[in-house]
Structure formats: C-alpha cells, structure tokens
Image (cartoon, rainbow, N blue to C red):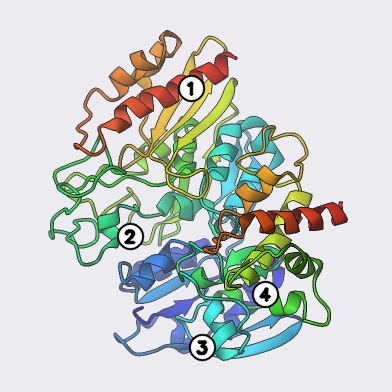
C-alpha cells in the first residue's frame, strides 16, 4: 500500500476543502471498499480525510414527509430503522441482500453509493482496464464477461455498478445532497448521480473534485408492495447477476429498476406503464438497446424472469 | 455510540499529518489510543496499519486471524463499540477512543465465554483458524438478533426476529470455514441463543 497522510476535519465543509486542496486526496468513511482497493494498489491516495466524525449519522423526517438519511448512517442502521422497514421496505431489503453482517456494520450510505465496480479485470492489475488505467484498454470485452453490463456500456468499458442499495434508491427517486469546498450545497437526483462509462469510464459519478455527500433524501413513501429480488451465484454474500427493485400494486402497476446490468442502476420510466401487461412487455422496452456479450446475454432473460417473479409476488 | 472518539481524535493526529501530502514511499506515523479487551492502549503507527495488524503485530494479540485480508473470510472479526467488523478492512488510527473486544477479551482457557464452551462441546471447528472470528462474529450476531435487526431471510420486516437455523446461517455468511464445520457451528450458536433467550 502506498503511504498516506491522514486528517480528521471537524465539519463537512472543512472535509470538502481538505480533499479539494490536497493532491491525490480521498475521503474515507467505512473504508470497506477503499482499503480493499488500496491494498491492491488500485486506489493509491496520498492523503486520507476521515469523515467519520462529522456527525452525519442520523435519519430525520423531512417537511415533505420523507426521510433524510445522513451520509454516515451505517448500512445496518439504515436497513434496521423502523421507518425504513415500514415505509421504504425495498431499501431495507436491498441493503440486507448486500455484503455480510460485518461489512454492513461499517459501510455507510454515501460510501455504498461510491463503491467501485467488481469487474474482475478492474481488480486484476496485470490486465488492461480503462477504468483503472485510462487508455490502457478493456480486457473484459474479449474476456469472461458473464457478470458484466448488458446495456449502457461502451467500447471502453462494460463494468457494472455492483451495489444493491442504489438500485432501491433509484426506484424511490432519492436525491443525493452534497457540499463542496466553498461550502455550497447541491442536490443531485439519483438518476443523474452515477454516469455511464462512455469514453471516460474512470469517472463513476457526477461529483466534482472534493464534493462531499452529506445525505440522501427519500421522498414521501410510495404505496405498494416493496420488493427487492436479487439473483446471484450463491445464497448469501455475493454480488447480483441481476436484481429487481420494484414497488408494485396488486394489478402489477408501479415502478421498477434493475441492478447488475449496467454502469448505474437501470430504470426506464417510459416502460413502467406496461407493468400490468407482464414482465416481457416491460423488459422488451427497458432492454431494447442492450448490447450483451456472448457470456452475459442470459441476463436479459434473467431480468425478465426476475421481474416476472416480482410481479407474481405483488399480485399474490 | 462512540461519542468521544470523533472530537477527542483531532489531538491524536500530529500536525505533520495534516494537509501535507506524503512523499512517495515515506512512512507516515500517527498516534492512536483505544481500549482493547478492557486495557487502554496507546500506539504510534504507520497510518497504513489495519486494526488487525495493530492487534497482532503491535499488541501481540494473535487470536484474531488474518485469512484473506480483504473482508471476505471473517477470520479477523472483532467487536468494536459493540459491533462486529472486519478488522482487516479498517485502519487502526480510525478507532481513537473505541472499545474493542477480540477473542482474548471474550474468554480465556480457565474462564470460557459461553460461545467458546459451546464450540468445544459441539466440535464447531476442525483446524481452528477461522474459530476466533466465528466466535466473535457469533456473539455479536446474537446481539444483533436481540436488538431486532432484520436479515435477508427475515420474512416480515416489521415483526420480531426469531433465532432460526436459517437466520444464523444467513447472518454468518461473512465467516468462511474451509474445513466445513458449519453444521456444528450452527448447533453451538443455537445452543447459546437458547440459553440467553
């Protein structure tokens, strides 16, 4: 691991300023993804700004009837919050489907949004990877790509966003709140938070340098059956091959987002009117522009069937 | 939870470790103080030192094991401020003021923790390498159930959580046992859960 200096600022604005002014600086919260990547020399920050003491760890009601989730709320605490379990069950379910008990105890709301891809070629430093080393090429394109993206990918990158939480937040229309080095606040709709790889796959999100996430705001609860279905290679502690976050009525109407298929949670609102007609009508539209590889074309059928299972669950 | 740690921490960071970037390759030292197994410990560490390496290499508490060093196996599990975490995936200097329990703090050969005794009784191990992590994880896992924290297999998110084999297996998925002693581990944990209920 590359050596680094370390500081603990007192306020969110100080933290943002510290990262903005220090070359090669990064925020550290739970550290469960960042330290893993630092050990592999995939992330090599020269300076760490520890944000754990910034008191951004509460969940508060908003005047609009929603919830404001502090950036440092641990995944365990967000999943277990009685308001989240009752009114945002899709979010509890998504969090509980991810990682292990130990990791959920450390991992934070903001850190979960910022986790890097688990593309095996991103992790293998002996291979080219445009996300890890811009311009070096993409070993995944002709490699083993069964876990990788089927839509929204580019010639430069077919990595997926690996998380579950963000998929639920996408279906909930959450908003990411940030503060920058000058202390200015900004709200980013979750749909615009993660970006597609395009020709700059090294950039995962629309955050600016030094911009710090302070909270994620959930709008007022959405009625319906909250469902998070995750298909993976083993029953626990594995990333999604395909996941479905949905809020559905008895007639199947509602909203749906897909995980494990793209560089960001994948939701096509225009397709949702077709939900009462069944899964295929929806996935035909949602994945109309899919460009799967030979290895991962199965994900298209899997997405249809996983949504089908969610619809069956909602109608029961 | 760790109210004191955040504010008290600033003083523990030398000013040299402030905004100055490290010259490549040059180690950076920082001070940290926490309580491990009831004993106050003060250390000056390379900032890169994981909590696991601080315990094993600096405090010579070698009960916690290094398996994968990437948070995948759970052999390093410690209980920090009442919560089980992967000690390999956290920096020691991030734990200023924390209360940390390792397997050595749970029990000793002449005063076994009930979970340790249950592992002996049910033969919950073969080689024993994953055992300290399994036991620390299991003790904290039962506390999580007691606190009403749901899991992936909890059918009703708004109902109290029951201690079932399915709940224990799901909640222990972050602890790998390559000898495959899982069924005996579940028996040991079920017995301890029953005793506490």
Looking at the image, is mark 2 or mark 3 nearer the viewer? 3
Q: Are marks 4 and 2 on the same chain?
A: no
User: Residue B4 location, x and y as percent?
Assistant: 70, 73
Q: Along the horizontal axis of the image, is A206 left or right of A212?
A: left
Q: Which mark is residue A22?
A: none
Query: Which residue was labeled with disc 3?
Result: B45
Residue occupying image coordinates x 52% and y 51% = A109
**On screen, residue B85 above or below B12:** above
User: Residue A108 location, x and y as percent?
Assistant: 53, 55
Query: Which residue was labeled with disc 1?
Result: A309
3D distance between C-alphas at marks 1 and 3: 52 Å
* SS for callout 2: loop
Residue occupying image coordinates x 69% and y 81% = B36
Query: Which residue was labeled with disc 2?
Result: A209
Which image quarter holds the C terminus of chain A? top right
Disc 3 chain ID: B
Residue occupying image coordinates x 29% and y 18% = A284
Cβ atoms under marks 1 and 2 closer than 8 Å: no
Looking at the image, is mark 1 or mark 2 nearer the viewer? 1
């Amino acid at each position: 691991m590359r050596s680094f200096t370390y500081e603990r600022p007192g306020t969110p604005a100080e933290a943002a300023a510290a990262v903005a002014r220090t070359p090669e600086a990064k925020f550290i919260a739970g550290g469960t993804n960042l330290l893993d990547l630092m050990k592999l020399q995939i992330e090599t920050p020269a300076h760490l700004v520890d944000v754990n003491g910034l008191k951004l760890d509460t969940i508060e009601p908003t005047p609009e009837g929603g919830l404001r989730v502090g950036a440092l709320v641990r995944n365990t605490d967000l999943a277990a919050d009685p308001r989240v379990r009752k009114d945002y069950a899709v979010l509890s379910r998504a969090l509980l489907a991810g990682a292990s008990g130990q990791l959920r105890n450390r991992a934070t709301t903001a850190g979960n949004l910022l986790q890097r891809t688990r593309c095996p070629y991103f992790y293998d430093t002996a291979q080219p990877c445009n996300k890890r080393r811009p311009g070096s090429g993409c070993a995944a394109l002709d490699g083993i790509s069964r876990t990788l993206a089927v839509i929204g990918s580019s010639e430069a990158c077919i990595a997926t966003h690996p998380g579950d939480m963000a998929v639920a937040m996408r279906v909930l229309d959450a908003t990411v709140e940030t503060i920058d080095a000058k202390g200015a606040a900004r709200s980013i709709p979750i749909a615009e938070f993660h970006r597609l790889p395009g020709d700059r796959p090294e950039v995962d999100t629309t955050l600016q340098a030094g911009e710090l996430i302070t909270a994620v705001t959930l709008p007022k609860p959405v009625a319906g059956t909250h469902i998070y279905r995750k298909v993976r290679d083993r029953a626990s502690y594995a990333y999604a091959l395909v996941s479905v976050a949905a809020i559905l009525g008895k007639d199947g109407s509602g909203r749906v987002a897909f995980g494990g298929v793209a560089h960001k949670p994948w939701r096509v609102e225009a397709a949702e009117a077709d939900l009462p007609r069944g899964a295929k009508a929806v996935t035909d539209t949602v994945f109309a522009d899919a460009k799967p590889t030979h290895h991962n074309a199965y994900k298209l059928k899997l997405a249809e069937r996983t949504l089908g299972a969610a619809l069956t669950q909602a109608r029961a | 939870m760790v109210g004191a740690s955040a504010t008290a921490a600033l003083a523990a960071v030398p000013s040299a470790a402030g905004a100055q970037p490290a010259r490549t390759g040059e180690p950076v030292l920082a001070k940290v103080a926490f309580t491990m197994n009831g004993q106050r410990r003060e250390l000056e560490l390379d900032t890169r030192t994981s909590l696991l390496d601080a315990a094993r290499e600096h405090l010579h508490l070698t009960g916690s094991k290094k398996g994968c060093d990437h948070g995948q196996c759970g052999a390093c599990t410690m209980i920090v401020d009442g919560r089980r975490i992967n000690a390999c995936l956290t920096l020691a200097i991030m734990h200023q003021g924390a209360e940390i329990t390792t397997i050595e703090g749970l029990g000793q050969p002449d005063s076994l923790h009930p979970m340790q005794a249950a592992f002996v009784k049910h033969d919950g191990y073969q080689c024993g390498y994953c055992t300290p992590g399994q036991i620390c994880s299991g003790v904290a896992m039962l506390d999580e159930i007691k606190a009403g924290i749901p899991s992936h297999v909890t059918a009703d998110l708004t109902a109290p959580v029951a201690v079932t084999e399915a709940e224990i297996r799901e909640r222990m998925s972050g602890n790998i046992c390559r000898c495959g002693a899982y069924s005996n581990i579940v028996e040991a944990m079920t017995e301890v859960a029953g005793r506490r209920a």
